Image (cartoon, rainbow, N blue to C red):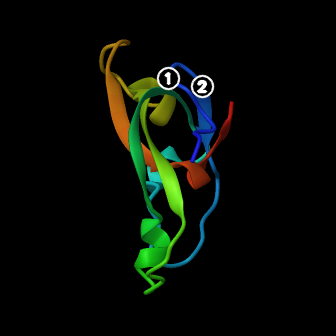
Amino acid sequence: MSERFSVGDRVRVRRAYPPGHVRAPYFTRGKVGEVQAIAGSYRNPEQLAYGITDAERLPLYRVIFRQSDLWSDYEGGPKDTTVVDFYENWLDPA
């Protein structure tokens, strides 16, 4: 499986709110970050959680965000960051 994104690409987390077991923290949805690393390819945990044992394989990306991009009222340092892992189905080009 080839990855849709490369290290250094800017990505936006999908602004979706499906019910059930999902792997995108609420506070990151709709936010823009940068791919820091590609962590491999794994079976989709959202499908596995519902017993789909032949779940599709998806690339997993490590995405870095500036804290101030995640929280508009953030008062910490301008270089402070948060890193979150996302499966490819949660990311769009920014």
Please, is residue 72 above or below residue 76 in the view? below
Q: Nearer the viewer, residue 7 or 28?
A: 7
Give the amino acid at mark 2.
Arg
Amino acid marked by disc 1: Val
Query: Residue sitting at 34 percent across and 24 percent down?
Result: 81
Identify which residue, 35 or 29, lies in the foreground: 35
The extreme front residue here reads 1
Furthest-bottom residue in view?
51
Residue 58 place in picture, x, y as percent: 52, 55
Q: CA distance from mark 2 to mark 1?
A: 9 Å
Of the numbered discs in the image, which one, if any, rests on residue 70? none
What residue did someone put label 1 on? 7
> Residue 21 location, x and y as percent?
44, 74
57 above or below 63?
below
* Residue, disc 2: 10
Residue 74, x across and y down, in percent: 39, 28
Asked which quadrant contains residue 89, the reply is bottom right
Which secondary structure lies at badge 2? Answer: strand
Q: Position of residue 70 (x, y in %)?
A: 47, 35
